[in-house]
Image (cartoon, grey):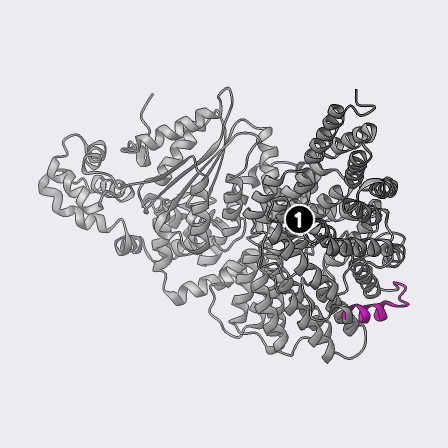
């Protein structure tokens, strides 16, 4: 087998370990257990990264499917540029119908990012787009020979593609895919550097390339110029190039062109030749080709990669004959390759040419390029990369184009690209009223990805006092949403309250008041919860749900009544009025932008706690589907998994609940750390693990997610402090648990919140105090039972009766547990029934009841309860109790 070769057919020297690793990785695609992986080559410019990638492509040729892409210095602002290079050939080779079938449910999510489907009217979730691209990659890889994905110049990749690549590299399962990436270390900065580091952490091989030694340089010199090249000449080649592989090859090519005799006496001429291969020397060489050819090269550098000959000709302002002659001259000078599209031979050449364009000329070129791209029908988004380079000049049309481009970027799931366009629009600057709208759009652009950034932009937009009323109200509501998602719920409530106070009575003010009730109600703590509840009760009294504001107010009233422990029967009646024909009205759904996902979530939880789990599960499943269809697979989908998991927990399907809740935390982890969505997920997971009897796993999960004070500013379901108190009890830290639960009780009763299912602090505290303070324990048990009977659900009453029984002995305890079993048999909550049956079997010394309880516990996945039932049965057998033989 012939040795690997690089540019101009020269051997790839001192890259044997890297080539061997690549060969091993390629062979791994064909093993008995095929495996893929990630190889990353990094190093300074000109050290041979591109040549290594070419060798990988050669290894896969004829055996594998090889997809290649390349970043470009002038196209870093074009979202999904690299992804499109990789995937478009495989997708666009199909008919439109085949493309729809291939993308399936992801057509409206992934299609716009790939440029094969029109953008939607709403922003796409970036995480949803990344997930959709991964699904598409897997689907294509399953139908192709082993797949190799090669990405060169990743330091110039657009951030959207790089974020996807970093996520894709961490994937597990699916068909084996080998990903090979190369990047220039010194040019990786900012977020790009962060993503490339993440890639390196996922790589099976991360190599930092070194410069060639003098020995390798000598071998290249002799391979190019002949074996008679002597040592002094070869040493000078190495001194001039510093072992840079690209510069060495170019210098030797120039020496060959000049018929330079490769001996020591000619070494002095090498410095001058070397200068012609880089920087000012390269530009001087370009200028020698003539003004027309130089202008053609400038136009090509402005366009960057995958250079359209038609656009170059138009941009350079020359005829076809001149253009053809210029292109040929540049090919002969080893500056350009290809015909249509054209490419620069090496990124270093493209960089040198681009940076050599006089600034004023470069700006003018970009302006004309933007006009040409727009006129060609390629859209504002592609023209935007040129608009970003144009000097500010109070150009209202440019502002409009950038806003249009930002909307297109958002629609394909590229909020960072949209942000860049809108920030540039502000520099123009726009007219004052337009500036306010641009600030609003900036806030909306980052709502899904960066709540903290959103807050600043929306505040600025509101403070201009130039938004029309509807847009201002919407901006205030979105600001309050962002504050809540940024764990500033109290401030969210204050913002909408202040705006409501300055707004005239009418629909806008009513929407703001509803938002105020929403954010006050979901605060973890509040100053006067009783007064807020009274105001909400008065506001919602008599509402029929005639419009969406009324419907949202009814949702909030239903949940507030649930937290307070009012009659479940009346709560269901209120909740029903918030629906239209039993379903969420348009505009109040899970993906609605007017109200957000919180109101339907609170409504569904109200049904769940009222023992209407069928209704709750329907709403939870609807939310999951809505987020998936919309491609919202970040925090929204994490929250949907939390809710579905909690529905399983209420049903007693603890194993399924744990699965959904762990997935919710995995999804939340991709968004950020210690976010409000984490609190609900970890709170429900700890509660579920304790129900399963997996105390150590609950402790580990709590420690991993810092489930301890200080708590999040928005409430968790079930009550976070109550769940943490239960965890402390399970860990044997009784004094800490008592302190935590006493404080929880004081805070909740002060707010008028008495629902023992939402916040079971009193029941756990009663059991904790049973031995040390039986009087206080009895008082708490009586309180819990009274409140459960006021709430009126079989679940609440049954659980409270079990608590009372735990503080009672003899026949009275048996009677209480028998009554608890009767209630819980009418409840949808199987785990609570299993607990009551086991406790009844123990108290009544009834083996049949213990057996039934154990079967129920097994069906629930409550391993700790199964063990308790088994031990009790063994004790009965030992004692010779009837029915235990």
The local crowd at label 1, few if under 14, some if 14 to 19, many if 20 or more residues have their Cα within 10 Å, is many
**Left or right: 489 as drawn, with respect to 878:** left
Residue 542 falls inside the magenta stretch: yes
Question: Count the marks: how many?
Answer: 1
> Which secondary structure is most common in the magenta stretch?
helix
In this view, the residue in front, 873 or 276, is 873
Membership of 215 in magenta stretch: no
Q: Which x, y percent locates residue 188?
A: 40, 51
Q: Residue 123 lies in what quarter of the image?
A: bottom right
Task: Please tell me which residue is depicted at 27% across the width and 33% down the height of the picture.
Answer: 14
Can residue 303 be spotted in the picture? no
Q: Give the residue at the far left of this rendering.
A: 265
Location of the N terminus by quadrant is top left
Disc 1 designates what residue?
726
Residue 578 spot, x, y in % from top left? 85, 59
Q: Nearer the viewer, residue 178 or 254?
A: 178
Q: Is residue 547 left or right of residue 111?
A: right
**Residue closer to the observer: 636 or 311:** 636
State the image coordinates of residue 512 (x, y, percent, origin top left). Answer: 74, 71
Q: Is residue 60 above or below residue 97?
A: above
Quadrant including the C terminus: top right
The spot of residue 527 in percent (x, y) is 69, 71
Query: Which region shows up in magenta?
Result: 532-545
């Amino acid at each position: 087998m012939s040795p690997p070769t690089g540019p101009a057919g020269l051997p790839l020297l001192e890259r044997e370990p890297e080539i061997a690793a690549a060969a091993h990785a390629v062979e791994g695609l064909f093993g008995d257990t095929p495996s893929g992986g990630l190889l990353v080559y990094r190093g300074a410019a000109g050290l041979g990264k591109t040549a290594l990638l070419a060798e990988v492509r050669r290894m896969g040729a004829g055996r594998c499917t090889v997809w290649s892409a390349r970043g470009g210095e002038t196209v870093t602002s074009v979202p999904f540029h690299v992804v499109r290079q990789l995937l478009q050939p495989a997708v666009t080779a199909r008919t439109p119908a085949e493309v729809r079938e291939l993308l399936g449910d992801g057509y409206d999510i992934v299609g716009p990012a790939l440029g094969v489907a029109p953008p939607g009217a709403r922003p796409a979730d970036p995480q949803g787009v990344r997930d959709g691209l991964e699904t598409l990659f897997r689907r294509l890889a399953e139908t192709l020979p082993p797949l190799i994905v090669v990405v060169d110049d990743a330091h110039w990749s657009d951030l959207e593609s790089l974020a996807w690549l970093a996520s894709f590299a961490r994937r597990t399962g699916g068909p084996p895919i080998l990903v090979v990436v190369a990047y220039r270390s010194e040019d990786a900065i900012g977020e790009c550097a962060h993503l490339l580091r993440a890639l390196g952490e996922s790589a099976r091989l991360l190599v930092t390339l070194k410069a060639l030694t003098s020995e390798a340089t000598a071998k290249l010199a002799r391979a190019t110029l002949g074996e008679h090249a002597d040592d002094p000449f070869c040493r000078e080649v190495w001194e001039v190039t510093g072992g840079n592989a690209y510069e060495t090859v170019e210098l030797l090519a120039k020496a060959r062109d000049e018929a330079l005799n490769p001996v020591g006496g000619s070494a002095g001429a090498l410095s001058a030749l070397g200068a012609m291969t880089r920087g000012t020397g390269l530009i001087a060489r370009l200028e020698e080709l003539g003004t027309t050819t130089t202008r053609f090269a400038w136009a090509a550098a402005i366009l960057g990669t995958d250079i359209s000959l038609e656009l170059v000709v138009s941009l350079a302002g020359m005829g076809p004959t001149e253009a053809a002659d210029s292109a040929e001259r540049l090919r002969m000078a080893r500056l350009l390759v290809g015909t249509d599209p054209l490419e620069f031979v090496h990124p270093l050449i493209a960089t040198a040419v681009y940076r050599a364009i006089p600034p004023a000329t470069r700006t003018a070129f970009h302006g004309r390029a933007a006009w040409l791209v727009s006129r060609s029908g390629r859209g504002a988004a592609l023209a935007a990369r040129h608009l970003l380079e144009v000097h500010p000049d109070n150009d209202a049309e440019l502002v409009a184009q950038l806003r249009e481009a930002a909307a297109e970027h958002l629609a394909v799931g590229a909020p960072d690209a949209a942000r860049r366009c809108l920030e540039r629009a502000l520099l123009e600057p726009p007219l004052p009223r337009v500036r306010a709208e641009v600030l609003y759009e900036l806030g909306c652009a980052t709502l899904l990805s960066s709540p903290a950034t959103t807050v600043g932009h929306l505040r600025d937009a509101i403070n201009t006092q130039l938004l029309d009323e509807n847009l201002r109200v919407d901006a205030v509501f979105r600001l309050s949403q962002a504050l809540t998602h940024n764990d500033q719920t109290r401030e969210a409530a204050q913002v909408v309250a202040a705006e409501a106070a300055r707004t005239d009575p009418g629909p806008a003010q009513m929407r703001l008041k509803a938002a105020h009730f929403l954010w006050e109600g979901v605060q973890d703590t509040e100053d006067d919860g009783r007064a807020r509840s009274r105001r909400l009760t008065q506001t919602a009294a008599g509402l029929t749900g005639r419009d969406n504001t009324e419907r949202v107010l009814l949702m909030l009233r239903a949940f507030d009544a649930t937290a307070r422990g009012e009659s479940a029967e009346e709560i269901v009646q209120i909740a029903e009025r918030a629906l239209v024909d039993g379903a969420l009205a348009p505009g109040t759904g899970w993906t609605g932008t007017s109200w957000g996902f919180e109101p339907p979530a609170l409504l569904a939880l109200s049904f769940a706690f009222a023992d209407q789990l069928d209704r709750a599960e329907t709403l939870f499943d609807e939310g999951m589907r809505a987020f998936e269809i919309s491609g919202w697979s970040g925090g929204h989908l994490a929250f949907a998994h939390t809710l579905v998991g909690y529905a399983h927990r209420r049903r007693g399907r603890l194993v399924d609940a744990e699965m959904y809740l762990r997935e919710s935390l995995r999804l939340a982890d991709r968004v950020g750390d210690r976010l409000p969505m984490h609190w609900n997920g970890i709170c429900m997971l700890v509660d579920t693990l304790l129900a399963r009897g997996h105390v150590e796993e609950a402790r580990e999960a709590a420690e991993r997610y810092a489930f301890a004070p200080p708590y999040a500013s928005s409430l968790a379901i079930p009550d976070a402090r109550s769940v943490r108190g239960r965890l402390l009890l399970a860990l044997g830290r009784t004094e800490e648990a008592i302190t935590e639960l006493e404080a929880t009780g004081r805070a909740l009763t002060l707010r008028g919140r008495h629902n023992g299912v939402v916040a079971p602090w009193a029941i756990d505290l009663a059991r904790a105090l049973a031995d040390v303070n039986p009087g206080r324990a009895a008082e708490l048990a009586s309180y819990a039972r009274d409140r459960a009977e006021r709430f009126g659900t079989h679940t609440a009453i049954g659980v409270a009766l079990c608590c009372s029984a735990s503080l009672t002995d003899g026949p009275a305890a048996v009677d209480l547990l028998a009554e608890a079993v009767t209630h819980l048999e009418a409840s949808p909550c199987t785990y609570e029934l299993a607990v009551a049956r086991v406790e009844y079997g123990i108290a009544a010394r009834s083996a049949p009841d213990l057996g039934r309880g154990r079967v129920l516990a097994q069906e629930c996945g409550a391993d700790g309860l199964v063990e308790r039932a088994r031990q009790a049965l063994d004790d009965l057998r030992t004692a010779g109790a009837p029915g235990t033989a």
